[in-house]
Image (spheres, helix red, strand yellow):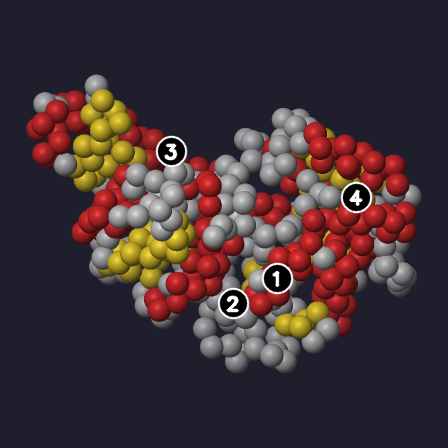
Amino acid sequence: MTFANREDAGRQLARRLEHLRGQPIVVLGLPRGGVPVAAVVASKLAAPLDVIIVRKIGVPFQPELAMGAVGENGVAVTSPGVTAMAGVTDQELAAVQATEAAEVAARAARYRAGRPRLDLTGKVAVVVDDGIATGATARAACQVARAHGAARVVLAVPVAPPGWQERIGADADEFACLLEPPNFFAVGQFYDDFAQTSDEEVIACLRAAAAPRPVPAGQASPGHADPPGDSTQVDPPGDSTEVEPMAGATRLAGNLTMPAGAPGIVLFAHGSGSSRHSPRNRYVAAILAEAGLGTLLFDLLTPAEELDRANVFDIDLLAGRLAQVTAWLRARGHPEQIGYFGASTGAAAALWAAAAPGADIAAVVSRGGRPDLAGPRLAAVTAPTLLIVGGADTAVLDLNRRALAELRCDKDLAIVPGATHLFEEPGTLAAAAALARDWFVRHLTVARRHAPV
């Protein structure tokens, strides 16, 4: 068993934690790789999301040996037995603790962008990571969560080696793990995509989770999708609400953001193995929303359909879903100007759908896309199209250059220097998001200006 990526792991882990729904839980992701997993868990359980930032306090002359850990707001836990055995003085302990505490504060400021830490007093802290190797960081996180006032601590991970619970001991009250393989060597061996998570992705997850979610009339509780037949208007400017876009008779899951006066809305087509929870797409969507554009991130497939791996590469099916959701949006009276943002295989679906007769799409942006999978449809695309590719993603860059030659519309190829396929290098995702923002603002605004009155 392997996980497609961290979002896939989060979906599966959320099902294991369903019994916690309705309890006073706070989901805490361990930066950086645990945060995309935690974001999906929090969304599925309709729970608040935060990060839990911890730093190991290492013995000065043997830093790999932990003598404690520090968290935010001056919280520190120490192991007197280790400090005594290592002969560490109070002054040495204080010096190391101060250094690590400063790093914790810096990371908290970077990730939360001014938002306060969520209060854990009396809550059930669900500590989530993308996997456990030694367990040292996870154990420290559990200790810090309890020191912050958590009434109970649940440690949840997709994968860990056999016997991992014994390493954590009584620092967690409950454990949840999907996979404990006897052949465990490293967490990454159980993921198809285990690319490094960037700071930008962590920030995007927290920003999306912190956005207010208004409850439409007739809806039972925050975090749940709109009930069938709901005709509630879109949420207030800048807010995101969960919706259930219809693709024909198929009900999907989505997150809609509509700033006041938006010239149009951008639909996101995620890549294979991903979903509307993709932290990279959520980051781009946040940048577009800040520029005044509407966004809709939605799952192209239902959970049952995702079980058949052939579906995630069925470009015809995915493009059809994108077109049907576009029609659903227009039928609900949303802005006429529609843009498509596609990542990986989702870019092929976006171009395929944009090429359909009468599609009337204002602009398309592909990030790290596979436009070659749209094949003969490329020449029929009329929407202005921007292909964004990482300069170090050589194979995909070559495919995009060939696709650019086949496109007959207003087109451009933007290369982000140093970026690999997933744009995990510092600053590269931000550069791609800025390119997408400028393209959509330019073309959706122009399209509205020239629309018939």
**Decide: marks 1, 4 in contact (CB < 8 A)?**
no
Q: Amino acid at mark 2?
A: Pro
Indicate which disc, 1 or 4, sits on the residue closer to the N terminus.
1
Q: Quick one: SS at disc 4? A: helix
Q: Amino acid at mark 4?
A: Asp
Where is residue 82 drawn, in percent x and y? 13, 31
Name the image quarter holding residue 23. bottom left
Is label 4 or label 3 in front?
4
Identify the residue at image location x=23%, y=41%. Answer: 75
Q: Quick one: SS at disc 2? A: loop
From the image, tell me which residue sits under label 1: 308
Is label 1 or label 2 in front?
1
CA gap, disc 1 and disc 4: 23 Å
From the image, tell me which residue sits under label 2: 214
Name the image quarter holding residue 257. bottom right
CA gap, disc 1 and disc 2: 34 Å
CA gap, disc 1 and disc 3: 43 Å
Count neighbours of disc 1 (C-alpha within 10 A) and say few if under 14, some if 14 to 19, many if 20 or more.
Answer: few
Q: Quick one: SS at disc 1? A: loop
Where is residue 286 drawn, in percent x and y? 59, 49
CA gap, disc 2 and disc 4: 40 Å
Task: Count how many numbered circles sit on residues in the image.
Answer: 4
Horizontal relation, residue 350 to residue 108: left or right: right
**Quarter of the figure with the C terminus:** bottom right
Indicate which disc, 1 or 3, sits on the residue closer to the N terminus.
3
Identify the residue at image location x=73%, y=44%. Answer: 370
From the image, tell me which residue sits under label 4: 372
Indicate which disc, 1 or 2, sits on the residue closer to the N terminus.
2
Identify the residue at image location x=29%, y=30%. Answer: 100
